[in-house]
Image: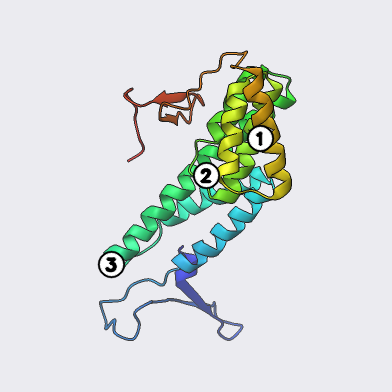
Amino acid sequence: LYSGSRASFPLPSSLPASEAALQRNWRTAGPRGGLPSLCVTMPALVERLKQAYRATFEGRFVEALQSFQQLIHSCLMLVVENRTQEEEVHDLLRLCAEYASGLRIELARKDLQKEGGSPVRVNELAAYFTNAKLQPIHLMLALRAAMTTSYKCSNFESAAHFGRRLLDLNPKAEIAAQAAKVVKVSEHKGPDQNKMNFDARNPFVVCNQTHTPIYQGNALVRCP
């Protein structure tokens, strides 16, 4: 931020370079009203958001998580001029927080799966990822993973639930056919065989420390 608001001018070789502060309102600043130039702008963050979206879609979750976290930090350096711009920043913050939380859950699931951890816990984490407020194209990835994981864990009721949610998003024909098949078979097989700490009918948020659900009506602490 400091470097982005200053310019360096070379002088003859016998003299050090001269520095000057850049002002974003230099036309009207006057001698005392100068405001520093901004190196963080909303259009630039929107472009970075698109890159984070692309990384999420392509399954580069570590890179995507880092991008969303950087966006959250960058939002703190934005300068807004009216209430509309302020709301846009708040919307971006909320969106990035949802993605950061969801991606941390998904990365925890993948690590646990690689370590050969509890299949039920793996299933729970896959289910929690679907609770994040994601764009439809990304939510379809989460729902497909949760559906498949639930079916492999013999949690057929949950598999059918995720399959129906996936179908509601109108995925590609191949994915829709797979989801419809899972729903049909799962409904025939019956209820979940392995109890999870997951209730699709009870609204919840996921604790970012323990990756467990905090259901509606329970006490929680939110970041201000």
Total residue callouts: 3
In the image, residue 72 sits, relative to residue 124, either above or below, namely below
Residue 96 point in image, percent of width and height: 48, 49
Q: Quadrant of residue 13?
A: bottom right
In the image, residue 116 sits, relative to residue 37, either above or below, namely above
Nearer the camera: disc 2 or disc 3: 2
Q: Which mark sits nearer the N-terminus, 1 or 2?
A: 2
Q: How is the image coloured?
A: rainbow
The foreground one among 6 and 49 is 49
For disc 1, the marked residue is 145
Q: Secondary structure under badge 1?
A: helix
Side (left or right) of 176 relative to 29: right
Give the amino acid type for the residue marked by disc 3 in the picture.
Asn
Residue 195 visible in the shown view: yes
Q: Secondary structure under badge 2?
A: helix
For disc 2, the marked residue is 99
